[in-house]
Image (cartoon, rainbow, N blue to C red):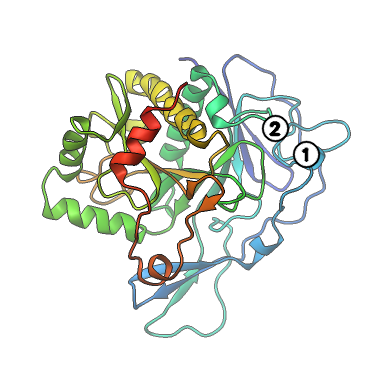
Amino acid sequence: MKIHRTETTLADGRTLIYFDESAQDRGTADKRDLPPRAGGSELRFDPLLDEWVAVATHRQNRTHLPPTTECPLCPSTSAFSTEVPAASYDVVVFENRFPSFSSAAAPVDGDSYPLSPKRPGKGRCEVVCFTDDHDSAFNRLTEQRVRTVVEAWADRTAELSAMDDVEQVFCFENRGEEIGVTLHHPHGQIYGYPYVTARTRRMLASARATPSLFAGVLASERSGPRVVATNEHWTAFVPAFARWPYEVHLYPHRQVPDLPALSADERDAFGPVYLEVLRRLDGLFGLAMPYVSGWHQAPVRADRDLAYLHLQLFSTRRAPGKLKYPAGSESAMWAFVNDVRPEDAARALREVTL
């Protein structure tokens, strides 16, 4: 699939990249008068849990549920200039104006303690717009458009992985106000973490202790009652150990560390399975399900042989009109209690009429 990639710069120096399915003239300049780029985030180490916490106070001022006419992710018009200068686009990626991590992060000031050091919140945060249609959703994209999104994810994963400040790349989508979305336009994000996240370190430790762990999980699920959708290259299933009421994992049948390592055939085959899963999720209760969907990829510089690329999708909705809130047990102790048997969740998703 031929993707036309055009890189340009926004008014405050942030990078913007168009991923077009046909050749386009992308010479329109961003003529806004923007303030200097935010770069005030810092990292503080939690010695009790052996992990970093980001502090990014400038994110308090980020755009929150604006009216459609003021959506910053829509194409620009003569009446309103947005983050995308063009009048239309297929898929576009740009540096987040309110990043949790940034190469522009300034040196930290104030006290630092021996057990809890601080350092600049270096890294990278980007926004991915899946379509210029404000009222659409990922599950209404064409298979061709999903393929373009996959190319954008792979492109950004490769480029961010080459940055000195990035140790792990995470591509994800939050959908629905129940999840905490602050912009309704169909979009996702990409985080270039300046460290390997605690969850990834724990998964890789498990894989180090149990050879072929991820492949073993996939093999056991492919022949079991929890498969939701499958094709030649991918299987989507509700894991036996699901924490959330409706949680689906998508694995390629071949172990690869990250999105750039997927073959052309694997990239082609992802869209049909993923779109089926998303449409089944929305068909479950006849409403737009809130969800988090994110790619687990290998760290940039360590344990890449242990990792197994896979996507995790979960919804906080457990029934019509009811959400699962991660309250005392989940939030305080990380001890999950699932309200729905994984086998029942998988069966309900399979029985949705598409």
Percent position of residue 255, x then y: 22, 34
Q: Position of residue 331 (x, y in %)?
A: 43, 67
Q: Residue at x 28, y 40 (%)?
A: 343
Q: Residue at x 59, y 53 (%)?
A: 180
* Element under disc 2: loop
| Depth order, front residue of 23/285 | 285
Query: What residue do we see at 71% from left, 61% from top?
Result: 61
| Residue 161, placed above or below residue 250 | below
Could you say where residue 98 lies in the image, as x and y percent from the top left? Answer: 64, 55
Give the position of the N terminus as an image quadrant: top left
Most extreme residue toward the right is: 79
Amino acid type, callout 2 = His
Q: Which residue is mark 1?
A: 68
- 259, above or below 169, in the image: above
Q: Cβ–Cβ below 8 Å for labels 2 and 1? A: yes
Q: Please provide percent x and percent y for residue 274.
A: 42, 28
Q: Is residue 131 above or below residue 311?
A: above
Label 1 neighbour load within 10 Å: few <14, some 14-19, many 20+:
some
Between 203 and 335, the one lying in front of the other is 335
Q: Would residue 230 be found to the left or right of residue 152 on screen?
A: left
For label 2, the residue is 134
